[in-house]
């Protein structure tokens, strides 16, 4: 998988910026957005007061040093949490800066209504304006090509240096502001107003300016806040209880205890995990419009893929012309050529090329007065109505059969056999007819992308059902489906079938992902829970989708799903670790605090820490340090291996649950040993 636009994960600049921002984030007006860490910050202010006025907070003047130390550790804890978030944000900003460099003011050649050209600034362009873009020009705004064809360098946005061909009409007519015309000239109609361009939206997304908490994140935050409130109540009731049994506990100790118990680890890392997840998607050259979309990708049950161009390379090339019904090869070749003279699809062009190579030649005046019937996915046919009344068509087996029969023609006996032969090879048969007479078949060859079987196996291991949906005939569909290893296929489907399949799956409570690039994919892309549009596709598709792949690689949906899963897993794993940690800390320090005055508790004091004060300090230091220790995992995400949800859960509970329980005992004991050496 190509990752061209790799931006350094951890440059000096990003780290320095993050350090500065972790201090700025201390502002309580910003801090309250992270409720768990806000509680720590408030606790810090109280222990600070307890350092200055110890007697008001149940401390003695002897304990000023202890109070100050606790205040300092709490300060560092909050700082560490802020650093995690700032670091994640910083990496997004670095990517946004690279994009911003693309967004330069350029001069545009505005075509006025009288046809004359006026030079204007790109920022002055409005929706609907028509501009001329010639070789060497930077395209001044997003738009659709309304006239011409050009090679365009999109490397500024995609990082891909090979130019792409864009042309008026069809699914490859949209152009993006900031890209450069390499050859030829086009007329472009501007489709967006200033500030709303694709690049603008991309920058905003990557920068995190529009970042909102995803529903999952909000739900988890609610759980964390509830836990925090419970522990505040627990710690508050501890005070009168301790007094009752004549144990003196100062406010500072209670706050230290509280901070150890509330889920500070996940509280500190939660937003970094979300931001880093989106960042990983961006690093794959996919722009996600929301964190919600990335998370949805992690929960996908069903994936819809089309055949041509997704599972196969999609550059279907004519490989042969096969006559049927006693016709000659020259005849099919000639009419295949005629039917494709005005067919600008890759298939049509390859037919013209092959027919010419095989010696067919169209008369110079054949197109005079001829009516062009363009290919649509709906009709699955294309061709010409010649001036002399001859009708030439080529198209899919089912549609041509329908057409010929409606015109009173007959289907030659050997047609079925030829169609089957091509289909069994995974090729697409196109039937050529003249008036109501079937002449033969065009064999369009396509190749399955390498490694598809392996990828679908992985998806199956993840528990995802794959459905290939194609306009091609059932036999070709079956051959390709079997060869690629998809779970199900739907053949002879019309564009609207996609949206129906999605709706049906969703009605069964499933989350559905799909990729697409055409305007007719737009409704389905919008309907899908994860819609990944190709950057090469139309604006309509890109606007409807919640993700855009800058490399226009439809199979990348597989990686996006893996990243989404990894994001959800990372969050789950670190939450488990955090809570297990807090439970362990409770058992590590509470006996140490109380056993001094209540000897009966001593049996519980399994850790044998050097002193109650050292126990609290060690636990609190461990609590702070664990945040930066886990930052790399939050950023990188936990390792993901395709397996079922249950197997994953068991595995993670073992690693992160058990690990979270054991780590504090080891960590706190070590810190205690170091502290007792110092003091
Ligand atoms: N240029 C063309 N002229 C006539 N018929 C065509 C042309 N291109 C494709 N067809 C026929 O129309 C069918 C449907 O095409 P469409 O592009 O909708 O689907 P597809 O490319 O076969 O599959 P997918 O949905 O996987 O891309 C093709 O299978 C083929 O039989
Ligand atoms: K904690
Ligand atoms: Mg197609």
Image (cartoon, rainbow, N blue to C red):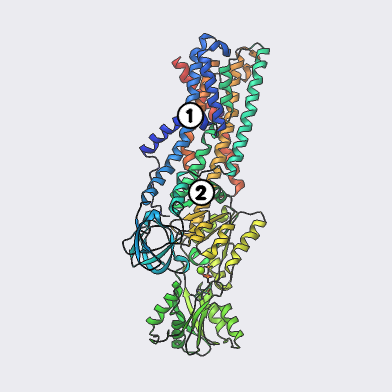
Q: Residue at x 56, y 35 (%)?
A: 577
> Which tag is nearer the camera, tag 1 or tag 2?
1
Distance between mark 1 and mark 2 Cα atoms: 31 Å
Residue furthest to the left in view is 136
Q: Residue at x 49, y 32 (%)?
A: 81
Question: How crowded is the residue under tag 1: few (<14 C-alpha within 10 Å), some, or many (20+)?
Answer: some
Relative to 648, is 179 on the left or the right? Answer: left
Q: Quadrant of residue 10?
A: top left
In the rendering, at what x and y percent does residue 231 appear?
A: 63, 26
* Tag 1 residue: 26
Q: Is residue 601 above or below residue 570?
A: above
**Viewer-closest of 323 and 495:** 495
Report the number of discs.
2
Provide residue 138's location: percent of width, then percent of height. 35, 58
* Location of the N terminus (image quadrant): bottom left
Which residue is situated farthest in the top direction here?
61
* Residue 447 vertical placement versus 548 (above, below): below
Q: Residue 152 versus residue 135: which sits nearer the camera?
A: 135
Q: Going from the N terminus, do you reach mark 1 or mark 2 first?
A: 1
Q: Residue at x 48, y 77 (%)?
A: 443
Marking on residue 260:
none
Which residue in the protein does label 2 denote?
A: 563
Q: From this viewpoint, which residue is outermost toward the front?
A: 114
Check if mark 1's residue and mark 2's residue have beta carbons within 8 Å: no
Residue 468 against residue 219 in the figure, above or below:
below
Evaluate whether residue 79 shows in this view: yes
Q: Secondary structure at mark 2?
A: helix
In this picture, is 154 found above or below 77? below
Q: In front: 209, or 191?
A: 191
Q: Would you identify the image quadrant in which residue 185 lies?
A: bottom left
Q: Secondary structure at mark 1?
A: loop
Residue 101's spot in the image, x, y percent? Answer: 36, 49
């Amino acid at each position: 998988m190509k990752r061209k636009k790799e931006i350094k994960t951890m440059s000096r600049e990003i780290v320095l910026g993050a350090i500065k921002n972790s201090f700025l984030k201390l502002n309580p007006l910003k801090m309250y957005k992270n409720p768990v860490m806000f509680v720590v910050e408030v606790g810090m202010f109280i222990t600070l007061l307890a350092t200055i006025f110890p007697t008001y907070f149940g401390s003695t003047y002897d304990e000023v040093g202890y109070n100050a130390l606790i205040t300092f550790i709490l300060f560092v804890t909050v700082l560490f949490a802020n650093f995690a978030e700032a670091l994640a944000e910083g990496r997004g900003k670095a990517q946004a800066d690279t994009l911003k460099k693309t967004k330069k003011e350029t001069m545009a050649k505005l075509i006025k209504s009288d046809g004359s050209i006026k030079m204007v600034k790109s920022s002055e362009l409005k929706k609907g304006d028509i501009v001329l873009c010639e070789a060497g020009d930077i395209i001044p705004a997003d738009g659709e090509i309304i006239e011409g064809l050009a090679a365009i360098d999109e490397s500024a946005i995609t990082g891909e240096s090979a130019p792409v061909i864009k042309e008026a009409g069809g699914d490859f007519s949209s152009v993006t502001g900031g890209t450069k015309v390499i050859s030829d000239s086009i007329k472009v109609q501007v489709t967006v107003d200033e500030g709303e361009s694709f690049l603008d939206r991309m920058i905003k997304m990557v920068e995190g300016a529009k970042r909102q908490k995803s529903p999952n994140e909000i739900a988890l935050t609610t759980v964390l806040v509830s836990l925090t409130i419970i522990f505040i109540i627990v710690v508050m009731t501890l005070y009168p209880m301790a007094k009752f049994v004549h144990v003196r506990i100062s406010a500072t100790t209670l706050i230290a205890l509280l901070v150890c118990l509330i889920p500070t680890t996940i509280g500190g890392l939660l937003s970094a995990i979300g931001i880093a997840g989106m960042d990983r998607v961006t690093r794959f050259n996919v722009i996600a419009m929301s964190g919600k979309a990335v998370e949805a990708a992690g929960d996908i049950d069903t994936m819809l893929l089309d055949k041509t161009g997704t599972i196969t390379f999609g550059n279907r090339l004519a490989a042969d012309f096969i006559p049927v019904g006693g016709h000659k090869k020259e005849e099919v070749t000639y009419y295949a050529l005629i039917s494709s003279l005005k067919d600008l699809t890759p298939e049509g062009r390859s037919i013209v090329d092959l027919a010419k190579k095989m010696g067919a030649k169209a008369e110079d005046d054949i197109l005079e007065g001829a009516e062009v019937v363009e290919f649509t996915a709906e009709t699955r046919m294309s061709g010409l109505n010649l001036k002399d009344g001859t009708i030439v068509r080529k198209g899919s087996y089912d549609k041509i059969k329908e057409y010929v029969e409606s015109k009173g023609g007959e289907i030659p006996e050997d047609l079925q056999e030829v169609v089957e032969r091509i289909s069994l090879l995974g090729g697409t048969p196109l039937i050529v007819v003249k008036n109501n007479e079937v002449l033969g078949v065009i064999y369009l060859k396509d190749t399955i992308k390498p490694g598809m079987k392996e990828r679908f196996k992985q998806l199956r291991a993840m528990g995802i059902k794959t459905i290939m949906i194609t306009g091609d005939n059932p036999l070709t569909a079956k051959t390709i489906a079997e060869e690629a290893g998809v779970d199900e296929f739907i053949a002879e489907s019309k564009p609207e079938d996609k949206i129906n399949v999605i709706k049906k799956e969703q009605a069964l409570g499933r989350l559905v992902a799909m990729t697409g690039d055409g305007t007719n994919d737009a409704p389905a892309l919008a309907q899908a829970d994860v819609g990944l549009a190709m950057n090469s596709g139309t604006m309509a598709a890109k606007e409807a989708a919640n993700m855009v792949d800058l490399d226009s690689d439809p199979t990348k949906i597989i990686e996006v799903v893996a990243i989404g899963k990894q994001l959800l897993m990372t969050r789950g794993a670190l939450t488990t670790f955090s809570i297990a940690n807090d439970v362990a800390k409770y058992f590590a320090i509470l006996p140490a605090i109380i056993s001094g005055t209540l000897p009966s508790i001593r049996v519980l004091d399994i850790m044998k820490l050097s002193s109650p004060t050292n126990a609290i300090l060690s636990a609190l230091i461990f609590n702070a340090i664990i945040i930066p220790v886990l930052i790399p995992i939050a950023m990188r995400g936990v390792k993901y291996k395709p397996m079922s949800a249950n197997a994953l859960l068991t595995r993670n509970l073992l690693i992160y649950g058990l690990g979270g329980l054991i780590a504090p005992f080891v960590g706190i004991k070590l810190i205690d040993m170091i502290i007792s050496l110092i003091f």
